[in-house]
Amino acid sequence: MQKKMLKFFIKLSVSLAILLLLVYAADLDALKNSFYSVEFDAIAYAFGLILLIRLVMAIRWKVLLYFYQINAGLLKLLEIMFVSNAVGHLLPSGIGSDIIRVYELSKNRGCSEKVLASVFLDRVFGLISMLLVALLASWYAFFSAQTGWTIPLLISLAVLMLPLGFFVTRFLLSKNITFSSKKKLLNKVINFYNRFIVALQQTDIPNYGYYVIILLSVLVQLIRSLVFMCIFIGLGADIAIIHYFVFIPIVFILMLIPVSIGGLGVRESALFAFYGPLGLSIATCTVAGLIFHALQLIMIIPGLIIFNLRK
C-alpha cells in the first residue's frame, strides 16, 4: 500500500511540475484571458460528445462480452462504466477503473476471468483504433499538403510495430504459471491468472465481430477528436479539422504513459507540442487540456451518485 501511495505522489508531483512550467511559460494573464473568453456553448457540445463516447464504449464492451457468452444489459454496462470511472479516479492506480469494471460485472456471475479478458481486449482495440485513425488522418493531411511527411511516417512505423507487440504479448500470455505456494492468496491469484490465460486463448471472435469492434473503436476516437475540436473552437482557435484527427489520438496514446495522474500535464504539454506549430499559444493548449480534465471530473458525479444509491 505504501508503494502505491508513493507512486501516486510521484505521479502527482510530475503532473503539478509540468503544469507549473506551462503556467510559467504561458503567463498567468494569458491563461486568465483564455478562460474568460471561452464560449460555453462549445463546451456544452463537448460535454455531450463525452457522454456519447461513454455510450459507444458500453456498446463495444457489450459486443465483446457477447462473444464470451456473457449477456449483460446495455444500461447495466453504462452504470458500471460510470461507477468504475468515478471510483477509478479516486484510486492511486492507472488501472483502477478496469479493476472496478471486472469486479462490478463478475461479482454475481462467477466468470471474472472472462470479464477480465473482455476488458483487456477492449483496451487493445482502443489502442489499435487510436493508431488507425491517426495513421489515416495523417496520410490524408500529407497528400492534401496540410502537414509534412514526418508525422505520417512516425505513425506508420508505430503501426508496423503492432504485429511484433502482438506476437510478444501472445507469447507472454500463453504461459501458464505452475508455481505453487503455501499462501492461499497467492495460489488464488495464480489460479485466476491461469483461467484468464485460458479465456484469452479461447477467444473466438468471428470476422464480422472484429469489424464491428474496430468500427466502434474508431468511432470513439473520432468523437474524442471532435470533443477537442469543440473545446478549441470555444477558445477561438482556427485550425484545419483534419489536424484534430491526426493529433488527438496521439495525445491520448502519450497519456497512457504512467508518469502522471490521469494524463494531467502530459496532455497539456502534448497539445502544445502538436498545435503550437499550427499557431496556438501555450495558454490556449493548456486551458484546452484543463477544460477537458474538468469535464472528465464532472463525469465522476453521476458515478458517485449511482455508487451511493446502491448502499
Image (cartoon, helix red, strand yellow):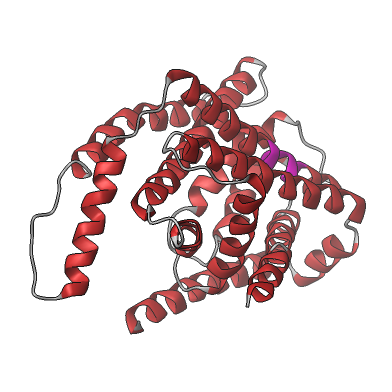
- Left or right: where 175 falls relative to 33: left
Q: Quadrant of the C terminus?
A: bottom right
Please report the bounds of the magenta region as a residue range: 223-229
Name the spot of residue 264 as percent of width and height, x first: 58, 63
- Left or right: where 21 falls relative to 8: right
30 w.r.t. 281: above or below:
below
Q: Total label count?
A: 0
**Residue pushed farthest top?**
143
Q: Quadrant of the N terminus?
A: bottom left
Foreground pick, 52 / 309: 309
Foreground pick, 109 / 236: 109
Asked if one can make out residue 273 in the rendered structure from this viewpoint, the answer is: yes
Magenta segment's dominant SS is helix
**Is 148 within the magenta?**
no
Name the spot of residue 161 as percent of width and height, x first: 33, 31
Asked if one can make out residue 264 in the rendered structure from this viewpoint, the answer is: no
Residue 21 falls in image quadrant? bottom right
Name the spot of residue 215 as percent of width and height, x first: 58, 27
Q: What residue is shown at x 50% (from left), y 56% (from top)?
A: 105
Foreground pick, 119 / 233: 119
**Residue pushed farthest bottom?**
2
294 w.r.t. 200: above or below:
below
**Is 226 within the magenta?**
yes
Q: What residue is shown at x 50% (from left), y 73% (from top)?
A: 91
Foreground pick, 82 / 184: 184
Name the spot of residue 158 as percent of width and height, x first: 40, 33
